[in-house]
Amino acid sequence: MALITQLNIEKKVSSKESKKLLFPFILVTSLFFFWGFVHNLDPILIPHLRKAFNLTDLESSLIDSSVFIAYFIMALPAGYIMRKYGYKSGIMIGLILFGIGSILFVPAANSLQYIYFLGALFIIACGLTFLETAANPYVTILGPSETATKRLNFSQSFNGLAAFIAPAYIGPMILSGKNLTQTQMDVMAPAELHAYVLEEAASVKMPYLILGLIILAVAVVFYFTNMPDVKDEDKEGADGASFAGALKSKRLRWGILAQFFYVGAQVCVASFFIKMATTSAGLDEGTAAKYLGFFGLTFMLGRFAGTFFMQYIKPGKLLIIYSIITILLSITAMIGTGILVVYTLIAIAFFMSIMFPTIFSMGIDGLGHNTKIGSSLIVMSIVGGALLPPVLGFISDVTGNIQNGYVVPLICFSVILLFAFNGYKTNKA
């Protein structure tokens, strides 16, 4: 009788604890949607600003570089602040930077200077660095450790939802559908050309202004919400967190490498999607943007499907299967023609959807008090999104064929396959 009473008490405590974690979990999951939303506006910005400022593929890829270089620069400071002051402090800083950077799109558009757009994107990305450094490991501790990977994939699924909504509904607000050739622009009067560039640049102001205000409102909600937190004390010795201790983990070292190449692959495929659709499949800009929305929808469905499959297939094994499929699809994207290329890229979105959260959770698994440091190091590896798209853009400019550049994602998915094999063998050992 006493045992039954004790079990009932434990069950009530567990239920009460789950309810206590539910609202913080919902709030943190919303962050995945918001940073997914702004990230998936970048593939719209790239062709839009390429057209407005007459950029090459390499120059337009600097949009990705300005975003993802921030991850490399800010990941360690973000990790330090969260070790010192906790996850909530990191999230608050991230939301404020995110909101300010979004609002700065208004003066950037008024200036008609490409460099100011890059600066605003850099500030947004500094905020996203704090959010991703905090939210990814935070979700893994808001519940049982044995379901951490499935929980993270579920939260990341809302990142996929944003990948559908941003291009499908906000893309048409930004893309004007006007595509002037260089010859047409050369014969325009200076005043007429100025008006054209001003109109193209101005279309981004309202979406980013509204986004910035929403993000700052979310920051207020976080401020007044009681969030469970874990802080690391500043201490040395065997019990203290350290970079050297974290990097002793072979799993983490592989995770850093794999995440570098995964983010590079994702950004390459998404950012040049419209260019591939308009050149390889002959679609117009508006239709290509709609297909980009399907790309995002497929990415979202892939996340939910992956979370479901992980109930029956171990994450490491599923990552092996998906890596092999994305390698084959990348080859198809390089040699395919017509609408097949577009459908191939959409299929890649489905099978690469689980990669980021799966690599992340596998990489920080077992780090204990070094988890925040490991999280910072994996977030730093997102710099792959800054370095690899320019390589694809360079190959495209030099060869005159954007499809040749897709050798970059092919190499990236091959590295992820090696990580998956290594992680799966470690789990079985």
Image (spheres, helix red, strand yellow):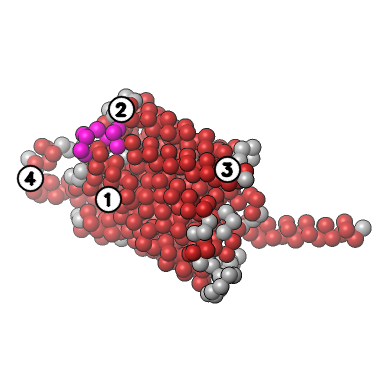
Residue 287 figure quarter: top left
| 240 inside magenta stretch | no
The residue identified by callout 1 is: 62
The residue identified by callout 3 is: 425
- In this rendering, which labeled residue sits more in front, label 3 or label 4? 3
What percent of the width, then of the height, locates residue 311? 64, 40
- Residue at mark 2 to residue at mark 1: CA–CA distance: 25 Å
Question: In percent of the image, x 10 and y 49: which residue is there?
Answer: 191
* Mark 1 vs 3: CB contact within 8 A: no
Mark 1 or 3, nearer chain start = 1
Task: Tell me the magenta residue range.
Answer: 397-405
> Crowding near pointer 2: few (<14 within 10 Å), some, many (20+)?
some
The residue identified by callout 4 is: 189
> Crowding near pointer 3: few (<14 within 10 Å), some, many (20+)?
few
Mark 3 or 4, nearer chain start = 4
- In this rendering, which labeled residue sits more in front, label 4 or label 1? 1
**Is residue 159 in sight in this rendering?**
no
Mark 4 or 1, nearer chain start = 1
